[in-house]
Amino acid sequence: MSTPSPAAPAPGQRNETVVVLALSLAAMVVSMMQTLPVPILGLIRDDLGVSTADVSWVTTATLLSAAVFTPLLGRFGDQHGKKPTLVAVLGVMVAGSVLTALASSLPLLILGRVLQGAATAIFPLALSVLREEIRPQKLPGAMALVSGTLAFGSGLALVATGLLTSGPGADYRDAFWMATGLAVLALLAVLVLVPATRTRTGGRTDFLGALTLGAALLLLLLAISQGQEWGWTSGRTLGSFAGAAVMAAVWVVTELKVREPLVDMKMFVHRPVLMANLAGLLVGFGMFASFLGVSYLVQMPEALTGYGFDASILRASVQFLLPSAVVSLLASPLGGRIVRHRGPRAALGVAAALGTGGFAWLVVDHSHAFSVIGAGVVVGAAVSFGYAAMPAVIMSSVPPHQSGIANGINSISRSTGSAIGSAVVTTILASRTIEHLPAGVPPLPAESGFTLTFAIGAAAFALVALIGRFGLRAGHRPAAAPARPAAAGPAASAEPVRADAAG
């Protein structure tokens, strides 16, 4: 009877690369769903014969759906199995993508977008799978790569949509058929390449906690995303903000009283977790401020405004946005190395420095293509480093059975930051317009609006620096995690990555 060579890798270790690639693909496709319709909202509006206010729900619906389903499905995956939940969520995304491609009315299109938004839960589920399947020395890099695909996918969707809809007679449905193909590919990759997870906590699903949290997030994001259209001082906007505050209080009371809460309040307010969520909010804000600010800036007609590059959607996507998206993906392995060798605190510090510098560059000079592209590349790298750091902070600070819900909340913080970024950019550019334009020309933003947008982006990343420096103190110790059985995977006996390793 022969014995295996001691040098032979364990079966789980042989499959680490394909697992990471499959989950990276799934995360990239999900992030693409969020920004994919942004360049084609005008085409959708004209084709379906709806108003600008109505067509904005094509993006808002996905954001609201993600807010409701991500924490619930993250926790459900921890309790009942991560792979089955991943497969089910990807199946829903495929169905939603087909519906959006076939929809002949706005309500059906919005329903499809709701189904696509539910797939945002893939990201926290993917990180939980990595925690089980990847060896501890490889885990920071794997999490950084999966996290890096979020910024890459968001930018790639803008570019791909611009390419598909650049010619005469363009049909916006081509973008959604592309999304369908990518969703099917992601589903097959996870189904075939990702092993069945072994750790399930079981227990009851806290539907009341999910309902109250979902209601609070829905009201908050509704007010943020529709505030510009409704008016920031209108009854609907203020009522939504007030309702969000009330439901947040109800959610906290609910979670403190139920036996098996959706979110452990002690975990939620645990300092490193709380700081990671604040950082997620700010980095998400910065990412969208860069995407939207640069996209709008370069499309401005220079003859009318005195600035801008007269870029088409295609040129704006390929020349000005694609480099940032590519660099964000290429930077993710480097972010993983920084996390592994210096700790997530150092990675967050690098992200803050790059983000502040990139936006400051745009404030000083946004009249040359080199500066706009170069600053965008720097901000793209900053977002990638930030996204690499946050999961590492969370994984080092919560026990394994809470990793899904903890990363789900962090995902929502980034989505909320993106929504705030979109609202802030839209509000600033709408409130600062050029006074004297030829008759018949719609209002166009003044250059000062873009300068202010980029200055606020720099301030957001400066706050990330403060979080990294003072929020993640050198004296921090990760929250104790219960012992895991030996069969729980390659990382079962691993010590978590220290959130203060750079301190």
Image (cartoon, rainbow, N blue to C red):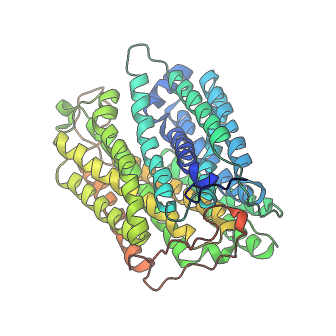
Instruction: Return the residue nearer the eye: 324 or 215.
Output: 324
User: Does residue 355 appear to the left or right of 422 in the view shown?
Assistant: left
Q: Relative to 383, does residue 91 appear above or below in the rendering?
A: above
Q: Relative to 188, does residue 205 appear above or below in the rendering?
A: below
Instruction: Return the residue nearer the eye: 427 or 371.
Output: 371
Residue 21, position as x, y percentages in the image: 52, 44
Q: Relative to 412, does residue 171 appear above or below in the rendering?
A: above
Residue 401, position as x, y percentages in the image: 70, 66
Q: Is residue 243 visible?
A: no
Task: Determine the residue located farthest toward the bottom in the rendered image.
Answer: 475
Residue located at (29% from left, 43% from top): 433
Residue 329, position as x, y percentages in the image: 39, 47
Instruction: Return the residue nearer the eye: 175 or 446.
Output: 175
**Count of residue discs:** 0
Task: Determine the residue located farthest toward the top in the rendered image.
Answer: 169
Q: Is residue 406 visible?
A: yes
| Quadrant where the C terminus is found in the figure | bottom left
Q: Quadrant of residue 22?
A: top right
Residue 439, position as x, y percentages in the image: 26, 27
Residue located at (41% from left, 49% from top): 288
User: Does residue 328 appear to the left or right of 70 in the view shown?
Assistant: left
Q: Relative to 25, does residue 184 appear above or below in the rendering?
A: above
Residue located at (55% from left, 72% from top): 496
User: Does residue 379 appear to the left or right of 185 in the view shown?
Assistant: left
